[in-house]
Image: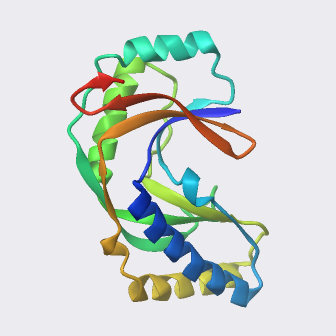
Amino acid sequence: MSYFLAFVPDKESADKIQNVVKEANSLFSDFGIPVRWVKADTYHITLYYLGENFPFFNQMLLKKKLTKFKFREFKISFKSIKVGISRSYKELVYLDLSKGGEELRELLSQVRREIGGKDTSLFIPHLTLGRVSEDLSKEEYRNVSADIAKLSKKLNLDDIEFTVDSLYLIQNKNGVYSSSYTWENKRGLV
């Protein structure tokens, strides 16, 4: 089981993201490249990864540390579909943000100060759509990246926008996501 703090798009945005996934899926299918797509009801933007083991005591401590955690709501929108967020994650298919990235970085900094965890990883704000299930050759990777860039230009990704007004503690057990706690902007823990 893994635990993380994340933001979740509203239903309307999730539906629009699902339409983007359908378009991307047909592109990957045309190449014969299998992708494990994220389920629409689990779309999220991870802010802070808490680990594979996060006992109840740690959850209570986190809840206490973030009781007064408040933030201003802001908008997130997307600009393109991409493949391979880094050399370590070349298999990742994701939506790159056009708005909201700086606000997410500021919130991450605030959360790191509040909870004092060990997470110092490089933070690249994105929404994961899926993962390529096989290793791609360099040529396949270049071709897929070029075609995904063309597809991005055809889609109205900037129409997908949602307001970030709540932070969730999410647990993932074998692909089943559930939320333990929610922090709303200006109100703290609810």
What residue lies at 47% left-to-right and 17% top-to-bottom? 62
Residue 54 horizontal/vertical position (percent): 63, 21
Would residue 187 be found to the left or right of residue 79 on screen?
A: left
Which of the pair 135/98 is nearer the observer? Answer: 98
What residue lies at 32% left-to-right and 53% top-to-bottom? 101
Seen in the picture, residue 96 relative to 186 is either above or below; the reply is below
Asked if one can make out residue 58 in the rendered structure from this viewpoint, the answer is yes
Which of the pair 37/139 is nearer the observer? Answer: 37
Image quadrant where residue 71 sits: top left
Residue 7 horizontal/vertical position (percent): 42, 44
Quarter that holds the N terminus:
top right
Image quadrant where residue 25 sits: bottom right
Would residue 76 be found to the left or right of residue 17 on screen?
A: left
Residue 169 horizontal/vertical position (percent): 50, 31
Which of the pair 105/78 is nearer the observer? Answer: 78
Quarter that holds the C terminus:
top left
Seen in the picture, residue 62 relative to 136 is either above or below; the reply is above
Seen in the picture, residue 113 relative to 122 is either above or below; the reply is above
What residue lies at 40% left-to-right and 86% top-to-bottom? 153
Asked if one can make out residue 86 in the rendered structure from this viewpoint, the answer is no
Q: How is the image coloured?
A: rainbow
Which of the pair 163/126 is nearer the observer? Answer: 163
Residue at the far front in the pictured view: 11
What residue lies at 27% left-to-right and 49% top-to-bottom? 102
Seen in the picture, residue 20 relative to 73 is either above or below; the reply is below
Number of residue marks: 0
Residue 125 horizontal/vertical position (percent): 42, 52
